[in-house]
Image (tube, rainbow, N blue to C red):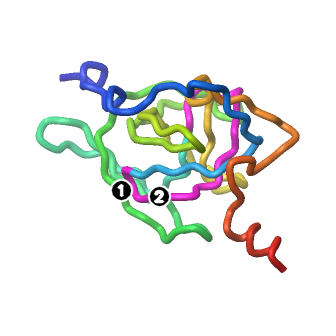
Amino acid sequence: MTAKQRPSKVSKLRRRLEEPCEIGWCELVDLPDFGLTALHAKIDSGARTSSLHAVRIKVFEREGEEWVAFTVPKSPEHAAKRIETKVYDHRPVKSSNGKVQERYVIETTISLGPLTWTGHITFANRQSMAFPMLVGRRALKRGFLINSGKRWMLGQPKKLLEEDKK
């Protein structure tokens, strides 16, 4: 069975919001399948596919299928975490520097504000970037409207909440 023939988890979750939801240019995202919560994510309508900062990416075979192991580096919100999951696909992706790279694509549950869905994520070295995750337009077309003048419209990171209380 190829990656494209695999049954999707999408049928279990809502695919789209019933009413549009306004979000800021950065928001908090959860990846519950991996136990990752409150990831700082940049909202990027110029990127097709969402991307996650990952290091030590290793591909291996398990029961005849292609899998990938990767580490999500530590951040203020969580400790470094080693994760293994099936490879869904491979896609050419043009990075911010204009170079095209072949990247692994995984399928996982994504939560952004009021919506939880099954979506696709690629891996990238985002170490030099301010946000460990980038949410692309395939995710945003589910009913999100971006207000580029606002941030954290769906909830602020703990650090900012603590500073607001002072």
Q: Residue at x 72, y 39 (%)?
A: 23
Residue furthest front as drawn: 19
Magenta-drawn stretch contains 46: yes
Tell me the kind of residue under disc 1.
Ile
User: In this picture, is 64 found above or below 32?
Assistant: above
Image coordinates for residue 124, horizontal then vertical, percent: 55, 44
Q: Which residue is drawn at 48% across and 37% down?
A: 121
Q: 17 or 88, which is in the foreground?
A: 17
Residue furthest top as drawn: 5
Report which quarter residue 14 is drawn in.
top left
Q: Residue at x 41, y 34 (%)?
A: 118
Tell me the kind of residue under disc 2.
Leu
Instruction: Tell me the SS state at disc 2.
Output: strand
Alpha carbon separation for disc pair 1 and 2: 10 Å
Left or right relative to 15: residue 18: right
**Can you identify the residue that label 1 sits on?**
83
Residue furthest right as drawn: 149
Label 2 crowding class (10 Å Cα cut-off): few <14, some 14-19, many 20+? some
Q: Residue at x 62, y 32 (%)?
A: 136
**Can you identify the residue that label 2 sits on?**
36
Image coordinates for residue 5, horizontal then vertical, percent: 25, 19
Label 1 crowding class (10 Å Cα cut-off): few <14, some 14-19, many 20+? some
Query: Magenta span covers which residues?
Result: 33-50
Which disc, if any, is residue 40? none
Q: How many labels does the image show?
A: 2
